[in-house]
Amino acid sequence: MTNAAVGVAAEQSACQALAADGWAILGRRVRTKAGEIDAIAEKAGLLAFVEVKARPTLAMAAAALGTRQQMRLMKAAEIVMGDHPDWGQAGIRFDVMLVDGQSRVRRVVDAFRLH
């Protein structure tokens, strides 16, 4: 399986896990000038910008999100919020969904913030 196919499969697994937990998926692979957001989900007015990381192990996936990617995601989220000012009435956060080689999914809630 190519890296792109692994990424798409991981995003699918992550979105299925979010939906199973009651989150509505508002967008997948949302492209902006600042970069792509893997998923945008909403639950009870809380908006989550979700980065999906797939690696052979959950630990490797957790280590894969760097500061530069976090900044890119925050800039992309600003663009999305400008286009959808009505989203996130109950708050906004950045989650990371980790997917390992056996398609196990773990969610890191509120994984990072603007300092």
Image (tube, helix red, strand yellow):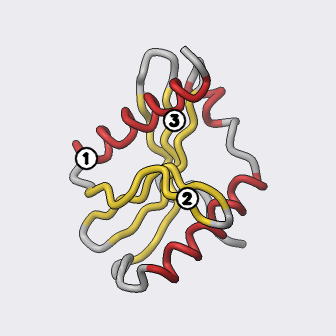
Mark 2 Cα shell of 10 Å, populated few (<14), some (14-19), many (≥20): some
Distance from Cα at disc 1 to Cα at disc 2: 21 Å
Three-letter residue code for mark 2:
Arg
Q: Give the mark nearer the N terminus: 3 vs 1.
A: 1
Three-letter residue code for mark 3:
Leu
What percent of the width, then of the height, locates residue 13? 37, 33
Which one is nearer the viewer's eye here, 61 or 27? Answer: 27
- Answer yes or no: do the residues labelled 3 and 1 have beta carbons within 8 Å? no
Callout 1: SS: helix
- Residue 103 is left or right of residue 60, and the answer is left
Quadrant containing the N terminus is top right
Name the residue at 22% across, 42% down. 20
Q: Give the mark nearer the N terminus: 1 vs 2.
A: 1
Mark 3 Cα shell of 10 Å, populated few (<14), some (14-19), many (≥20): many
Which one is nearer the viewer's eye here, 2 or 58? Answer: 2
Q: Give the mark nearer the N terminus: 3 vs 2.
A: 2
Residue beneath label 2, please?
31
Callout 2: SS: strand
Q: Residue furthest right?
A: 68
Three-letter residue code for mark 1:
Ala
What percent of the width, then of the height, locates residue 97? 48, 42
Q: Quadrant of residue 54?
A: top right
Name the residue at 52% across, 60% down. 94
- Residue 43 is left or right of residue 62, and the answer is left
Residue beneath label 3, please?
98
Q: Which disc is residue 19 wearing?
A: 1
Name the residue at 31% across, 55% down. 25
Front: mark 3 or 2: 2
